[in-house]
Image: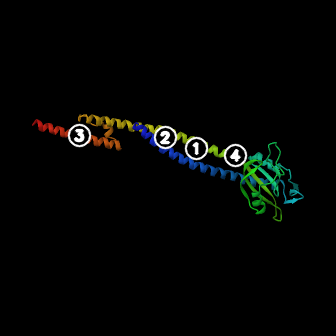
Amino acid sequence: MKLKWKLAISINIILLVLLGSIVYFMNSQVSRLANLKIEDELDRSSRLGLALLESHYPGAWKAEDGKLIKGSSVLNDDATIVDTIKEETGIVSTIFLNDTRIATSILDEQGDRIVGTTASPEVIEKVLAKGLDYKGTATINGKLYKTFYTSIRDDSGKIVGMWFVGTEYEHLKKIQNSSLTNIYIASGIMLILGFFSALMVGNFVGNSMNKLMNDIGVIASGNFSVPVSTELTKRTDEIGGIANSVEHMRSSIKEIIVSIKEETDL
């Protein structure tokens, strides 16, 4: 195998390993940042929804006779706010009476709202039983969602329901895939450019080595009158060092031969 190909392959193996490490690192970072972006969107959408509910339905929350009431308004089957949030942000939302959905922008396959269904046990345990917010994933109507649940309390502080916002996990994957596609394209371009750059370097070094080998061949044939190419001896790299050593050897041998001839002529 020619030297230029050996150099090109060696350089590209190093470049491939380096790019592979970068892509692996970026993959984990993109996943983390995409999750943070979604969590931030859900947090803002949750606060927006609660503010809209407070503005649209002023007054305290209370649960009464199987109904969730805000001020003087019954929120069962009232999709005004949840639909507004979906239209404005693309985020789905749900109002719960205790653990049961009473108003939601999530639709089933027939296009009906999934009211009357209940939250998952882990959400019920954390939000209704412990009064804590729930951030994570949940399967709703057969689809995986990135979710945020928070409790709804009446005037006495008793938990009477939950407020939910979420986005399909597919949305998170789209964000990740979009970013990763750009990284893969950039890495591919870098690898191609690296290959041709390495080939050019290998070709340059290979040509220089061929010239040096030709000059050494001339000397090896017994012709010490032809100096090593100045193009090589002026170089400051390893090839230049070898060329200068060969030229020094050629010059020394030539001087010895000239000296011997002069002594013989005497």
Query: Mark 1 to mark 4: distance in Å?
Result: 19 Å
Q: Tell me the quarter of the picture where residue 132 sits.
A: bottom right
| Residue at x 35%, y 38% (from the top left corner) | 209
First-in-chain label (2 vs 4): 4
Q: Is residue 27 left or right of residue 152?
A: left
Three-letter code for the amino acid on which mark 1 is drawn: Ile
Q: Is residue 236 visible?
A: no
Circle 4 — which element?
Answer: helix
* Mark carried by residue 251: 3
First-in-chain label (1 vs 4): 4
First-in-chain label (1 vs 3): 1
Task: Look at mark 4 in the image and give the residue it sits on.
Answer: 171
Query: Mark 1 to mark 3: distance in Å?
Result: 56 Å
Q: Position of residue 225 (x, y in %)?
A: 23, 34
Query: Mark 2 to mark 1: distance in Å?
Result: 16 Å
Three-letter code for the amino acid on which mark 3 is drawn: Ser
| Residue at x 18%, y 40% (from the top left corner) | 256
Q: Position of residue 92 (x, y in %)?
A: 76, 49
